[in-house]
Amino acid sequence: MPAAVHRTPAIRVLPEPEGLPDPLPEPAAEDLRLETVLGALSDTLRLRIVRTLLLEAERFDHPCGWFGIDRPKSSLTHHFKALRAAGIIRQRQYGLERRSHVRIDDLDTRFPGLLGLIAAWEPEAD
Amino acid sequence: MPAAVHRTPAIRVLPEPEGLPDPLPEPAAEDLRLETVLGALSDTLRLRIVRTLLLEAERFDHPCGWFGIDRPKSSLTHHFKALRAAGIIRQRQYGLERRSHVRIDDLDTRFPGLLGLIAAWEPEAD
DNA sequence: ATTGCTGTACGAGTCTGATCGTACTGCATG
DNA sequence: CATGCAGTACGATCAGACTCGTACAGCAAT
């Protein structure tokens, strides 16, 4: 079998519509650090969030409550903030809710292959 | 510019010569967990070790002292153990010294694209 | 304005991991 | 066998992160 070619799977970058609320503060694409990104992804909960965003986000952003995660709200805030600080997700405020999506283009440019790893990840069987 | 194709760079897997000492205890290839591997790589010192092994290991294994790392020995033991426990490196005892190399084939099979990220990583400028 | 909802801020408790000194093991060589 | 060297084991210390309760801010709709 020839060596596999690694491409990010069928994830396409939607052009960002105009007139969106400004994103919350986030690191610039050129400031993303591999060690920081990997650290943020070394948690199964966060890995699950990002993978879900990648695989089921055929539309656009999703609010925090959209993921069926059985944790207190303050814990979710903590993890979404960690993902945003690492530069993995972008968050925007839409009235009440704060919606998130993966910074696909930035990550694919700086760390080609990374998103494919996340998309292919399978959570521990329980 | 077309989307880049992500392949592990010019790293070839040398067939393991016969008659080597047994590897130290390590997780089996099918037990490797992405979150554990990413966690082990979220440290710049360990990232540097793995990258150095990948890029300059045209020969075979390297002893711990071969990396020019200015840290006490007990710290190095700690990090090499973490890398081995995560399944990233394999270690063998050769008389006095314990030599390490990256488990290239296992990692490339389970997590295609990961080694390319490490090889392309640039340590923080200092 | 009052109620309800999404999510934040802050702080405490807890846990894991990084760092490193010291003492030790195990092998090799004279 | 005595010395020297590579690396380990153990333990102490410290910093950072995860978890979560509680109180709060901000928007929306009645």
Image (tube, coloured by chain):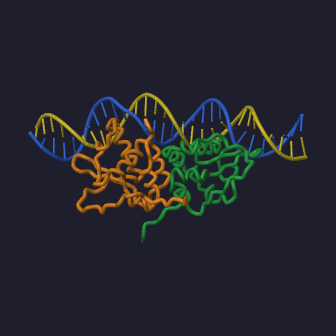
Chain colours: A orange, B green, C yellow, D blue
Query: Residue B8's spot in the image, x, y percent?
Result: 55, 60
Viewer-side residue, A109 vs B68:
A109
Kindly tell me whether residue B126 is visible in this rendering.
Answer: no
Query: Residue at horizontal 75%, vertical 46%?
Result: B94
Q: Where residue A121 appears, x then y in whole percent?
A: 44, 47
Q: Nearer the viewer, residue D23 or A65?
A: A65
Question: Quadrant where the N terminus of chain B lies?
Answer: bottom left
Q: Residue furthest front?
A: A1
Horizontal side of B36 relative to D23 (left or right) equals right
In this view of the protein, can residue B28 be seen by the observer? yes
Residue B25 percent across, percent down from the top left: 64, 40
Q: Is residue B62 left or right of residue A13?
A: right
Name the residue: 63% across, 45% down. Answer: B80
Q: Is residue A109 left or right of residue A92?
A: right
Question: Quadrant of the image for the C terminus of chain B?
Answer: bottom right
Count of numbered badges drawn on the protein = 0
Q: Residue at x 21, y 49 (%)?
A: A95
Give the vertical position of A124 relative to B63 (above or below).
above
For this rendering, which residue is in front, B123 or A53?
Answer: A53
Q: Nearer the viewer, residue D25 or B47?
A: B47
Tell me: D16 left or right of A83: right
Image-quadrant location for residue A126: top left
